[in-house]
Image (cartoon, rainbow, N blue to C red):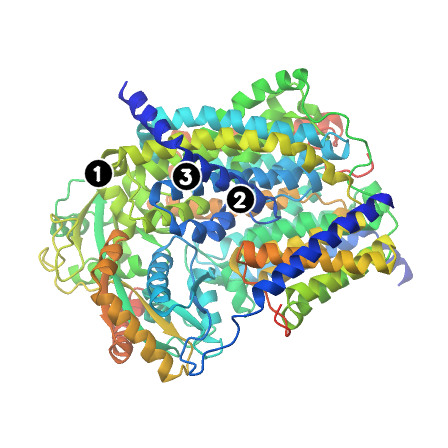
Amino acid sequence: MHRITEWLLRPDRLAALVLLAVAGVAIREGAPLREGIMGPGLAPLVAGALLAVLALGLLLWPDRGPTAEGGAAPGRRAPWTFLALVLYVLLLRPLGFALASAIFLAALFRFLGRYPLWMVVPAAAASAGLLNVVFRWGLQFPLPVGPWGF
Amino acid sequence: METFSLLANGFAAALSPQNLLFAFFGSVLGTLVGVLPGIGPTSGIAILLPLTAFLPPTPAIIMLAAIYYGAMYGGSTTAILVNIPGEVSSVVTTLDGYQMARQGRAGQALAIAAISSFFAGTLSLVGLTFFAPPLADIALAIGPPEYTGLVILALAVVVSLSGRSLRKGLASALLGALIAMVGLDPQSGRQRFTFGVPQLIGGIDFISVIIGLYAIAEVLVSIEKAIASVSTIPITRLFPSLADLKACMGTMVRCTLVGFGLGVLPGCTPGAISFLSYDLERRVSRAGPQFGTGAIQGVAAPEGANNAATSGGFVPLLALGIPPTPALAVLLGGLMIYGLQPGPLLFEKQPEFVWTVIASMYVGNVMLLILNLPLVGIWARLVMVPYPVLGPLILIFSVLGAFSVRNSTFDVWVALAFGLLGYAMRKLDFSETPLVLTLILTPILESSLRQSLSMSAGDVRIFLERPVALGLAALGVVLAAATLYARRRAGAGATGAPRQEGS
Amino acid sequence: MDTMRKTVRVWLAISGAASLALILAAGPGGAPAAAATYPTRAVDMVVAFAPGGGADVTARLVATYVSKKWGQPINVVNRAGGGGIVGTHEVLTARPDGYTLMMDNHAVNAMLGASQTDLPFKWDERTPIARVTFDPVFYVVKDDARWRSLKEVVAHIKANPKTFRWGTAHAGGISTFAITQFFAVAGVDIAQTNRVVFPGGAPTLTALAGGHVDFAGQQWSEVLGLIGGKKIRALAVVLPERVKDFPDVPTAREAGFPELDVVGWQGVTGPPGLPAEVVERWDQAIRGAAADPSFLDQAAKIGKVIAYLGPQDFRKYMQAEYDKYLPLAIKMGIRK
């Protein structure tokens, strides 16, 4: 069991498994829609089959070791940033564009740049305000408006 | 020649202070809008269309055309500075443009983009001026079989752009193909890969994918690396040297021809054209081997081809009333609101209008150059902004950009999802360029192939009867084989370098 | 650190100015009038297609006219995707308060209901307000084609079905119905002919003009460019009378096929359960537009014929469309 997990844990192999799954979905989606060479099912089927072959190859014979890119120690900054982004999009409608953006920017300026709060908050608020003005008024974007009217 | 006098009249009208003003405004607005990630010419025109509603037809069209050009240029700016293509056709510009920015050569990259665009744009407008009607007729002769051949040729580029691992590049390409199939199959109207989600019926929007794969993923990766800013190398010169310019001459001429020639064909998207031009340059230019690491020709080629393709696109639009791309379709809609009907009749019934528009396109090109060259200095300094500030701002722009395409929050989530995918792909050394390429090309390939077979009642031999189609496809296969061979010889990694950090 | 300080100062200055401007601009002007008649704020008119298309152009025409009349902005919002399904779905699931409406058209109404079985909504669960315009279908061939009339085309097809190619925009759209109805009425065996599907009207007509297909049936706004340019020729138009701009093109009846009645249209509809007051106001406005000569003029410029119908008649029309298209869709294998 241990040997298998070790064997699997190479990044390339994990990617290959994901690709195999995708290929599987593609083939399943394509097969019932086949109506000859002009049917809608042919393309997914072919693409899925080719992908499956490539993924299998990748699984059994992965590329050589981690690259410079992949080798960079994954810190926690990126995942947190992404989480902040997700929260931001979720908060857009309830809070409105201006407020949500201000919070988002303030949080990230602080988290990523370690600037003192007295700098971060006004900068974030100002940026959010400026963006709001430019996009809602200048370009007439239908941006979500928060409960306080801005 | 009558054309000259008509054109002269057009210039007289275009150079009127009022129209010049509108051309200027259009260029500025278009550039600003185009700079925003994901907001390119199509969205740009759609957003700014209401602004022109108050104007009489001629200045309105002049302004719209200027917006279009401006947006195209704006898209390249972010592609070069922060590796985020403003829209489809700027994707290729990121390959070398961003590398140049990281080497402290952002100024040169931006400048050559402007110069190449100007050169190609102006030259191709000459083609538009004198050869529009006959070119339009040739364009009509290009049918589904020929398009199939063309796309096969374009797909050969995938091999070149696969990065270090060909297998991963091909897998990436196949992913792109599958993503393109989500939604309604255009040939049969059946739903594919929609899994019961209504928003997926509309397919996965291309811009959301680009924003995710390029903007969001790039920010995530850069944040992880904790880079101080895009470039820490002090900017010493802002403009290309004379030697640089000379080295690009051949490139600029070639990309003009390719861009204009292909831009004339309805249905040939600027994205595909920029890829083809880039690949051609890579094979032909002396600086070929450096493509992907910051070769200035790698920026000149796609930028020029883009602009030439724009002019080319006006050929079917003005001469036949057929918009070759979605952006020009919006432009056409704008024209029709003013009661103008593009088509050969337009040349006959309202020649002053047509020639004024063409003349203002010349003017627009000049205007863009004049406007943007001085701004290069300002833009280039952007690379020195601390990343903890720049990164989050880019993320907000990404959200806005994704939203703006179809006014849909679903597209924003798609962009986020692709941001995650792009991040994973970079960590795992999968090149994302093939994905983008097949995303553009698969719908065209599938449609053209099935249309061709419909035309012949399922008989594959239709391809044998059409030499152009066959020739193009064969060329594609040959080029792919040649690249494969070259890769094998150089031990992979010498051609089409992947997005390499820390190299 | 110094750069950051400087940047912050700049931002503070800008934000100060911006907030001031915002406050000043947003301040007064929010108080509603005493008797709040609909609409009290901007209305969104959703178009389920990309800008520049038939529905979009009509929407802008109507929106400009009505917003001028009422003094409230009517925003045209484009929500393209899935052949109109995405935008339609959004409107049909929106709050029925009258501030989200749709510029409906033939493609996402009865026709859609007839050709698709797995829609995320029920096609007839919408509140009809008023039909506005027609976009008539023209049957067209290449300009130098040898057929001079629809009857000649039919004769040719019956003699050589296997080499005859006809092009349609999309798999189940108006051009498909127009041509299949024509073939059904003329007694042509469709299965023997070749149908080529294109992603839109423009590519279909381009292919026709280039000789890659022999026959097509597209709408006025799509064909006028190429007809004017003498690349394609119209054999008939499906309308009670001839179109002013094309006096030489016979109507379907004159061409010998009076049963042909597939026509494109646009109209305003809303989510189910729309209040009667909203419907009434809009109906009034559109009725007024339909009688206004300047409006009619502008409509003609974009290739549309005014065809006003009030809400009850509109509902009946929608049902009649469905009754017309359903059997055709089933018979021709369009219905999936």
Type of the residue with mark 3: Ile
Q: Which residue is mark 3?
A: B62
Tag of residue A117: none
Chain identifier of the residue bearing label 3 in the image: B
Nearer the N terminus, badge 3 or badge 2?
2
Image spot of residue C73 (x, y percent): 43, 65
Asked whether, in this view, residue A58 is left or right of residue B128, the answer is: right
**Disc 1 crowd, CA 10 A, few/some/many (<14, 14-19, 20+):** some
Chain identifier of the residue bearing label 1 in the image: C
Of C223 and A111, nearer the camera is A111
Name the front one of labels 1 and 3. 3
Q: Answer above or below: position of C78 versus C216.
A: below
Image spot of residue B126 (x, y percent): 41, 24
Q: Using the numbered discs, state the Cα–Cα distance from disc 1 to disc 2 in whole angstroms.
A: 37 Å
Q: Secondary structure at mark 1?
A: loop
Q: Which residue is mark 2?
A: B29
